Image: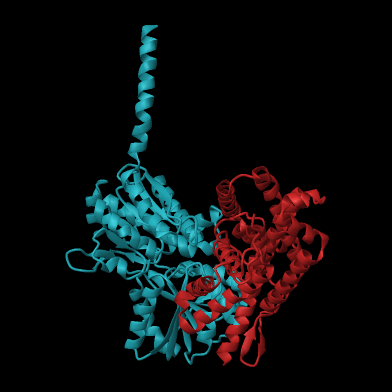
Chain colours: A red, B cyan
Amino acid sequence: MDQFLQHLVNAMVLGGAYALLGIGLTLIFGIMNVVNFTHGALYTFGAYAMFIASTALGLNFFVALPFSIVAGLALGAAIELTLLRPLRGADIDTTMLVMIGAGIILQSGTLWIFGGVAKAIPSPFPDAPLTLGSVSISWLRLFVLVAAAALIALAYAMINGTRLGRAMRATFQDSDAAALMGVNVRFIYTATFALGSSLAAAAGALLGPVYVVFPQMGDLAAVKAFAIVILGGLGSITGAALGGFILALAEEFGAGYVSSGYRDAMGFLIIIAVLLAKPTGLFARAERVG
Amino acid sequence: MPTYRIASIAALAMALLAGPAAAEDAIKIGVNQPLTGAFAASGSYVVNGAKIAADEINAKGGVLGKKIQLVVEDNKSNPTEAAAVAEKLITSDKTPVMMGAWGSSLTLAVLPKLEEYEIPMLVETSSSGKITTSGNPFVFRISPPSALEAEAFAPMVEKLGVKKVDFLVINNDWGRGAAVDFGKMLKGKGVQVGLTETMDAGAQDMSAQLAKIKGTDSDTLMITAAVDQLTLVFKQMAAMGVKKRVVTTGGSQNPDQILAQAGSAADKTMHLTTFLPWSPEKTPDPKATAYFLGEWKNRGYPFAGSTESFRGYDGIRTIAAAIEKAGSTDPKAIQKAFWDVSFIGLNGPIAFVKAGPEGKESGQSKPGVYLIEIADGAIGEVKL
């Protein structure tokens, strides 16, 4: 039982970060239909931004975090403006190749600038964990869970409750109709990509201090983000959030009770099982026909 | 005028001939290391160590009157790439001898190429037993295989009071091999072996494995992984309150980096290592160690990298010694000459003894293995 609770606590923390990654990607991949191969690189970017902000710039941890998220927002906007905007209307293969190239450039650039040695981000929390009975959790991880939950709620409220969010949903349902209603469609594309990117950067900035920061950290994160989006159903925020937690639970309990060697396989087994039963994912967006 | 023209044509011809002749003159040594991917940091250190050796040798006049030239290729931390790099070094660069390929899985992928082209390779880092026991006569290894590490650790087991051990190892030839070899040694000493948990090479979250290990009655956890993953394991152990004696193996722990990045989480952890840069005077050849560490510092590399890079340094020195003994750059002659190499490396005498099936033996050198401990922010040898 003790072990079960410890696994559950671990899975919740991991799930929060997975959910952030998933929501960011579902906006871009699920709603905008851009197969975003820079998502992992943006996750890495968020972590390095956090590293620079809290070491070289000497910012406080809690200032460095929003700084990294805004940096991710800016990089996302820059990618959209320079790479995706000129390619609007191009076929999906072209966009995909350009995004793969951008992902490679970002990752190799990071390796070039920072080298391959992993960096550690100092954390302001005490090293001693919070212990409740037999379950221990570090203060940093607890903060990550709370911050992730807050960011998820914020993203949800923004997309479902604001004019900008409504304009986003309208644009991706029918961009012509939205444009006719006076929505600045070009701005919405940039804003959506930037928002998705900032969530990936947020996940990186939150997990960077928990783990270590290195140029390839985004590879596995990107694979998981895609899995979460497909599991939750393309374009569904609720699906991505839930998908993140399901993947984390599957990995944690799979590794804990079946075999740690197949940790990553467990998550994908669950996904295969879900897709067999519900091929469009848990919360599929209704597709417009015609 | 005609004489002038002839002279200039002659000069041009000389220049054209001299170009390739100069390159031909250098003795090429292939270096197959991970410079990108999961093991980029370690592989780069090894290459930088190798360059120090090459420069030192060339400054002293080279080998057989020729300069040595390192041909460095990146195997991207990927076994398929490691085999492709070996093929490229052998067929396109025509290197008569190579050094590589850091990780056990990377090195194992290269082995068939050595047999195919009959080119010897010096293995500087890998510790999987399979490398020297699979009957490949082109392999000469200066790093200790896990079994040798286990053998060196055996006398310390009782003194440390180890009763029951769990393993947490990287899920590849290196990690799984270490769990088997150490497990065998421990069982032989009457120590119980509990769980063997694995983690993928790129995995960042080991909390599931650690939650499981936390619940066992073992007193010691033996971990085999490279520095970045060890840092994460220590931080996560501290976060979950896993309190067991920790001994790491494999020689790629980089204790200084662990200390810098894991901080107090790494306190009281013990590491089996093959080099003692913290106390150069205690190394087998203090003068050489001091020279190497001085040069490492001069070039602006972090001290922490020296526990990895010394292998590249010793590896190239060993290869140079073999070429010198061979008296030629014929791969067959170099392969034969490796058996006659004998000098004091930074971590003990380098001399090859036969390992593996008879008639097709690989060469294995037996370096020193030391147990060090991180305690109160300092690194020191464990006195038992």
Q: Is residue B124 visible?
A: no
Judge from the rendering whether residue B32 lies leftward or rightward of residue A288; answer left or right: left
Q: Is residue A155 visible?
A: yes
Q: Nearer the viewer, residue A263 or B350?
A: A263
Quarter in which the C terminus of chain B is drawn: bottom left
- Name the quadrant containing residue B105: bottom left
Q: Position of residue A30 (x, y in %)?
A: 64, 60
Q: Nearer the viewer, residue B186 or B21?
A: B186
Judge from the rendering whether residue B338 lies leftward or rightward of residue B277; answer left or right: left
Residue under the image location 60 percent in, 66 percent down: A229
- Name the quadrant containing residue B75: bottom left
Q: Position of residue A210 (x, y in %)?
A: 63, 72
Quarter in which the N terminus of chain B is drawn: top left
Q: Nearer the viewer, residue B109 or B161?
A: B109
User: Hey, which residue is sitting farthest left in the picture?
Assistant: B359
User: Hey, which residue is sitting farthest top in the picture?
Assistant: B1
Q: Position of residue A103 (x, y in %)?
A: 58, 53
Q: Position of residue A94 (x, y in %)?
A: 57, 46
The number of callouts visible is 0
User: Hey, which residue is sitting farthest front in the picture?
Assistant: A290
Judge from the rendering whether residue A137 lies leftward or rightward of residue B293; answer left or right: right
**Residue B23 against residue A2 in the figure, above or below:** above
Residue under the image location 60 percent in, 80 percent down: A10
